[in-house]
């Protein structure tokens, strides 16, 4: 049964301005990791759409929720590039993207609820494991992060249609791996990720 997130954690924080923060795109082989931060200006607001962990929603539900969230909350999205992911590693790049999203908010949060078990440096708040299933602010951030990243991958797929990024979002599906073997690795790939690293190593050993 899918948990329904609420404002319970936000209300327990004893702060008025609480941001929920989440990221999307830690697992794909290419594209940026994207984070979002969302502040609900009022917690007694009537929400006419379903807001929950973005992974538990259909594309249509996410699109409707995205439209409502972007019109009724204070929000921001930010990213870390594949190059930064390779330099920092995916965990630290995800935390940096979260920090950037919080810093981009037009209203400075007094407290942040971060999805996961790690708090980004210099952020006042705490980490909530499975936060996108518990906190409405984090769930809303998960929707913004996923929709933002999916759009980035869709736009990139127009330039590079052969990889199917609009369908696979950069994840290592069998079709995607075959496309990489056929068309090669470009600047949007994360060179430190296993399947890409192995292919670069193989290419080098054959030279």
Image: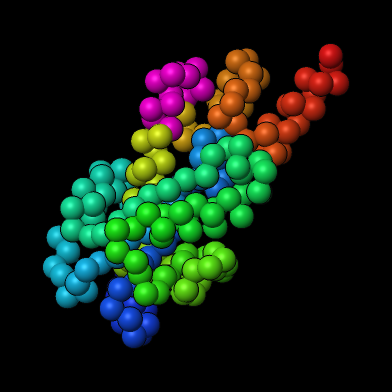
Pick the front one: 98 or 55? 98
Q: Is residue 96 above or below residue 195?
A: below
Tell me: residue 117, above or below residue 75: below
Q: Taking the image as drawn, is residue 54 in sight? A: no
Would you say residue 160 sits in the magenta stretch? yes
Q: Is residue 191 left or right of residue 110?
A: right
Start-end of magenta stretch: 153-164
> Which residue sits at x=41%, y=55%?
101
Left or right: 153, with 187 as reference point: left
Quarter of the picture holding the C terminus: top right
Residue 116 appears in the rendering:
yes
Compared with 206, 132 (above or below) is: below
Residue at the spot x=47%, y=65% of the render? 115
Give the left or right position of residue 66, taking residue 194 as reference: left
Q: Quadrant of residue 175?
A: top right
Residue depicted at 37% across the width and 74% down the height: 110
Q: Residue at x 74, y 26 (%)?
A: 200
Residue 124 location (% of width, % of height): 47, 73
The secondary structure that most of the magenta stretch takes on is helix
71 or 102, which is in the foreground?
102
Instruction: Give the number of callouts.
Output: 0
- Above or below residue 207? Residue 195 is below
Q: Determine if the magenta segment contains residue 197.
A: no
Q: Residue 12 sits in which quadrant?
A: bottom left
Residue 146 placed where, x, y %? 39, 47
């Amino acid at each position: 049964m899918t948990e329904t997130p609420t404002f319970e954690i936000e209300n327990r924080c004893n702060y008025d301005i609480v941001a929920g923060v989440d990221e999307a795109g830690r697992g794909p082989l290419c594209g940026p990791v994207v984070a979002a931060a969302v502040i609900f200006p009022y917690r007694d607001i009537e929400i006419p759409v379903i807001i929950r962990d973005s992974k538990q929603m259909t594309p249509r539900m996410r699109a409707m929720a995205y439209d409502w969230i972007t019109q009724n909350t204070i929000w921001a999205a930010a990213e870390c590039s594949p190059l930064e992911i390779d330099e920092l590693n995916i965990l630290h790049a995800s935390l940096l993207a979260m920090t950037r999203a919080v810093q981009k908010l037009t209203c400075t949060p007094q407290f942040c609820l971060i999805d996961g078990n790690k708090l980004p440096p210099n952020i006042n708040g705490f980490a909530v494991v499975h936060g996108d299933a518990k906190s409405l602010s984090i769930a809303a951030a998960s929707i913004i992060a996923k929709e933002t990243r999916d759009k980035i991958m869709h736009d990139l797929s127009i330039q590079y249609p052969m990889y199917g990024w609009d369908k696979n979002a950069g994840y290592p599906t069998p079709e995607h791996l075959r496309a990489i073997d056929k068309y090669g690795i470009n600047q949007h790939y994360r060179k430190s990720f296993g399947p890409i690293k192995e292919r670069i190593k193989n290419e080098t050993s054959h030279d």
